[in-house]
Image (tube, helix red, strand yellow):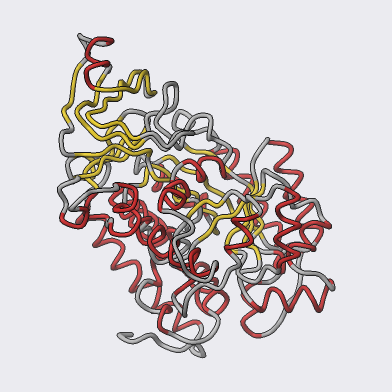
Amino acid sequence: MNLVLERATIVTCDATRRIIEDGAIAIAGGRIAAVGTSEELRRLHPDWERLSLKGRAVLPGFINAHTHTLLNVLRGTVEDMSGDAIYGFMTPISFVMTPGERAAMARLGCLEAIRSGCSGLVDPFRHVVEYAEAMADSGLRLWLSESCADARTLEIRHGVYRYDRAWGETFLDRARALIETWHGARDGRVQVQISAHAPDNCSPWMLGELNGLARRHGLTRTVHLAQGRGEVEQLRRAENATPAEYLDRHDWLAPDVVGAHWTFCSESDIDLLAERGVQMAHCPASSSRRGPHKVRADRIIERGINIALGTDNMSEDMFQAMRLGIIVHRGAFGGGVRPQPQALLDGATRNAAQSVGRLAELGSIEQGKLADLTIIDLNDPSLRPIINLPSNLVHCGTPACIESVMVAGEFIMREGRVLTMDQAEVVGDAQRAAESAWRRLLDQAPDLPRPAGM
């Protein structure tokens, strides 16, 4: 179908960050055929079907550069509990869940992501091959990976670090199955990455195995980096290195690598990461649940590192990521108005596309790029009055202002209704899955504290 979206405000996020009033986008074969004013595109394509978007803005589809949809199972619980959330709850519950429970939570995450304006998700986690189909059926563009480790991660909460190759092979087997089954699936809409869970979880052997898979299949890589004090302390004890230094020793710092979090990276770590061209997936909202994220965003920005935005866990809300992101980044500079809102909007669009190696096709509204688009209702009260639209979106936008989402020129959400899912069914299935998974976790690990309500 050849379609012209017209009479909209087009926020291109292109190299000049052009905003076109009374703008239009021509779409053919899933790609953007032309961008300009409504008048220009009427002349260029007089016979094409037209859709008036007066009172709306069109943006590049948001790409959540780092999330774990399964961890919505913990929403409203561990945010308010003390202790190690990663190895105390996130890791154990991911292993006790059944395949059906994993699929139910993944569908919920995809539903929320679409309603938050996302056209794409980057989701590294465990047992992904079991629920990849549930995610793919959402219509989202996906970058999936099995988050591999050969440390016995279920023992870490007991203070034990022990590498086990047989344990590691189970992760590698799932990674291979994910690549074979899903890389390039759904007309290329689903891609697979290589993921090392974290430096302290991966021996040199595991990092080497993952590098071999990445080279063999031409895949980009991702890793959690310096996300917790325990990770930093373990690598100092075992390797006399920071997480960044350890990864560098084993060929895991390069432009194709995206590191998530960087919470405890030192200035010298940041300099090393910049020299190697590593990219950052920043999840400021998730990392600020126990107080403002203390990442050295000032130095990261000054070193010119590409910062893509993600939500990490218990949320898929990219507006929250942008809003908390600008606060965290400005706080790192000691307060003020640096960076400006467009930088955070870039983090959800063009920077995120760059982080997955797809800026040539995604992340901005330009001729020839894929028509992954987010349509905003400019009459949503959260956005009015409008003087500077990027500022309104970053400081004040909410998922309620999302009207429609397109992927490759096809609506997956239109006029407030997600077309690829039954919302009531998804929400009900997720509620039942979360309750049963929590009961099983607490039965199997009675030493864990119980969240309020359980």
* Residue 196 image offset from top left, x and y in percent: 66, 57
* Residue 342 against residue 38 in the figure, above or below: below
Image quadrant for the N terminus? top left
Image quadrant for the C terminus? bottom left
Q: On the picture, is 142 further left or further right than 25?
A: right
**What residue do we see at 34% from left, 18% from top?**
28
Q: On the picture, is 233 further left or further right than 181?
A: right
* Residue 99 image offset from top left, x and y in percent: 44, 58
**How many marks are shown on the rendered structure?**
0
Viewer-nearest residue: 169 or 228: 228
Q: On the picture, is 92 further left or further right than 316?
A: right
* Residue 262 image offset from top left, x and y in percent: 62, 64
Viewer-nearest residue: 437 or 359: 359
Viewer-nearest residue: 91 or 331: 331
* Residue 258 against residue 98 in the figure, above or below: above
| Quadrant in the picture for residue 349 | top left
The residue positioned farthest toward the front in the image shown: 336
Viewer-nearest residue: 237 or 135: 237
* Residue 111 against residue 50 in the figure, above or below: below
**What residue do we see at 71% from left, 64% from top?**
199
* Residue 73 image offset from top left, x and y in percent: 39, 68
**What residue do we see at 22% from left, 32% from top?**
8
**Is residue 258 in view?**
yes
**Is residue 98 in view?**
no
